[in-house]
Image (tube, rainbow, N blue to C red):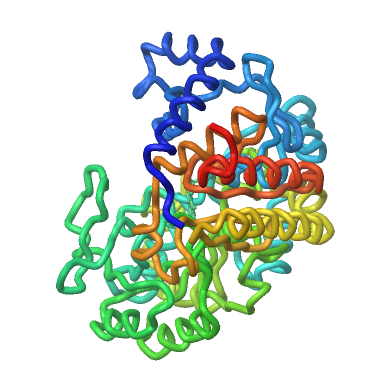
């Protein structure tokens, strides 16, 4: 059943008004932010529905309290940065020890925690050698440089509507002749995309092979499921086919697990035995403290090592002054050792399954042609059914107006989902009651949308 746009407009007006009345302090802080570019500390923070963002007062576990004193059940979890929950106690303790007792937040000297984290990442993801960053973007950038160095090839193959951070090569979609062109909104691209990138459609091995056949691809860079254009799950055989193709055409496979870590303790890589050459992870592994990492195989290390002229320990383009600092590494150790454990994932997947079921039941009851996809602890609905199978069709199913209504309806009733599309993430302390609250509210929102509830 299509959504009645006039009715949607009426509902949004009502929800915006309620949002403005409930958040005078947030509105005032936003109004007064004359010295911030876009009025926010980072331009994306303008993304919140309702005309201005909620200002944070405090957060713990999966609860956020805003400056107007309102408390929320948080399914946004910092768009995955807080998948471990807000300020988990083991991370707070490890960070406090490093900050307050030991000192030495950043010294350019290694600490013993780093080897522990490297060994744990090896246990979870299978790659033997690790290096640290502060963001997933940096991990991707440095991984791309190493892939180019290792293979001597210039281009990166990405998928239409992928997102890997502010990585220049990845903002590509296929143009009319199949060559890469910039996706809409790509700001200040250094060179035209076809010079750096080959682009294919997710779940379409034919399109991948056609691009690899040019013989100039250093690496395929992909998530195991697209997660930044809704969730687009891989069809059976797609990831295995990707691995066969990259071997046949002499490219490397970089798997970005930054979001798909939600699949389990070793991400989709462990769950589906993906065997990447390079693995990238960021956001959540530091429990909220800026952290990222990339892992490489011994083969890749050997290929890189064959280039002694490449400067990897100073100004050669890989590494950063604050990366691998003692604070960040201590936070990663605490997160992996005591928070995002195997047991925590089992619980998170369990409540995400309940969440997904609640969304599906509400969609069915309302008779809407929407779909919901789950990736471990992560769940997301899309305004299309069946669920889109590639980035381009998922992009076509986007509807920012509908999203604004749903996000506002939930926020006005104490539930936050991510401001970027319709993602909800579970953390170790998310409860079944939290999920049931969302299910009830989501059902009420859809009732109003299709006219079975009162406006
Ligand atoms: C798959 C993936 N990789 C990398 C990044 C970049 O992460 P960050 O912005 O923390 O560098 C993101 C951000 O959303 C992401 O979704």
For the point 42% across and 11% down, which residue is it? Answer: 31
Q: How many marks?
A: 0
Say which of 194 and 416 sits in front: 416
**Quadrant of the rendered image containing residue 91:** top right
Q: Quadrant of residue 188?
A: top left
Residue 208 shows in this picture: yes
* 257 displayed left or right of 285: left
Measured from the top left, where is residue 279 in percent x and y? 54, 66
Q: Is residue 330 visible?
A: no
Q: How far across and down, in percent of the image, does residue 58 sit?
A: 69, 23
Left or right, residue 168 beside residue 410 = left
Q: Nearer the viewer, residue 130 or 212?
A: 212
Residue 48 to residue 334: above or below: above
Q: Is residue 414 above or below residue 231?
A: above
Q: Position of residue 359 (x, y in %)?
A: 64, 54
Left/right placement of residue 95 relative to residue 363 reads right
Towards the viewer: 340 or 304: 340
- Residue visible at 73% across and 47% down? 427
Depth check: 433 or 174 in front? 433
Identify the residue at image location x=55%, y=23%. Answer: 54
Q: Image quarter for residue 394?
A: bottom left
Q: Residue furthest bottom?
A: 248
Percent coordinates x, y for residue 239 in the rendering: 51, 79
Residue at image coords 81%, 48%: 432
């Amino acid at each position: 059943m299509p959504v009645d746009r006039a009715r949607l407009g009426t509902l949004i007006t009502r929800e915006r008004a309620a949002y403005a009345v409930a958040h005078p302090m947030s509105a005032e802080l936003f109004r007064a932010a004359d010295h911030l570019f876009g009025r926010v500390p980072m331009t994306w923070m303008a993304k919140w529905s309702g005309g201005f963002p909620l200002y944070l007062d405090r957060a713990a576990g999966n609860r956020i309290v805003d400056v107007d004193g309102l408390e929320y059940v948080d399914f946004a979890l910092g768009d995955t940065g807080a998948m471990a929950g807000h300020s988990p106690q083991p991370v707070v303790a490890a960070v406090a020890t490093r900050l307050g007792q030991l000192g030495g937040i950043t010294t350019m000297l290694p600490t013993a925690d780093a080897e522990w984290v490297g060994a744990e990442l090896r246990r979870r993801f299978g790659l033997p050698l690790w290096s640290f960053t502060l963001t997933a973007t940096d991990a991707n950038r440095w991984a791309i440089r190493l892939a180019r160095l290792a293979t001597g090839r210039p281009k990166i193959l990405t998928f239409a509507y992928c997102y890997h951070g502010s990585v220049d090569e990845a903002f590509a979609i296929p143009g009319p002749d199949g060559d890469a062109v910039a996706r809409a909104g790509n700001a200040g691209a250094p060179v035209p995309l076809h010079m750096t990138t080959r682009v294919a459609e997710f779940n379409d091995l034919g399109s991948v092979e056609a691009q690899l056949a040019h013989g100039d691809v250093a690496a395929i860079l992909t998530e195991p499921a697209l997660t930044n254009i809704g969730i687009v799950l891989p069809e059976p055989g797609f990831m295995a086919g990707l691995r066969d193709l990259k071997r046949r055409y002499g490219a490397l496979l970089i798997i970005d697990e930054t979001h798909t870590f939600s699949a389990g303790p070793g991400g989709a890589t462990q769950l589906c035995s993906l065997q990447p050459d390079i693995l990238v992870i960021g956001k959540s592994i530091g429990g909220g403290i800026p952290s990222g990492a990339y892992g490489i195989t011994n083969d890749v290390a050997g290929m890189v090592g064959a280039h002694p002229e490449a400067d990897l320990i100073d100004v050669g383009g890989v590494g950063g002054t604050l990366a691998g600092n003692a604070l960040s590494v201590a936070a990663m150790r605490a997160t992996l050792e005591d928070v995002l454990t195997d047991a925590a994932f089992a619980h998170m997947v369990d409540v995400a399954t309940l969440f997904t079921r609640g969304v599906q039941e509400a969609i069915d009851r309302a008779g809407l042609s929407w779909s919901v996809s789950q990736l471990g602890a992560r769940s997301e609905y899309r305004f299309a059914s069946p669920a889109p199978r590639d980035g381009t069709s998922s992009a076509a199913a986007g509807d920012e107006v509908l999203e604004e209504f749903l996000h506002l309806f939930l926020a006005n009733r104490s539930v936050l989902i991510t401001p970027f599309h319709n993602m909800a993430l579970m953390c170790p302390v998310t409860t079944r009651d939290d999920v049931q609250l969302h299910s009830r509210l989501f059902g009420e929102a859809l009732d109003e949308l299709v006219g079975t509830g009162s406006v």
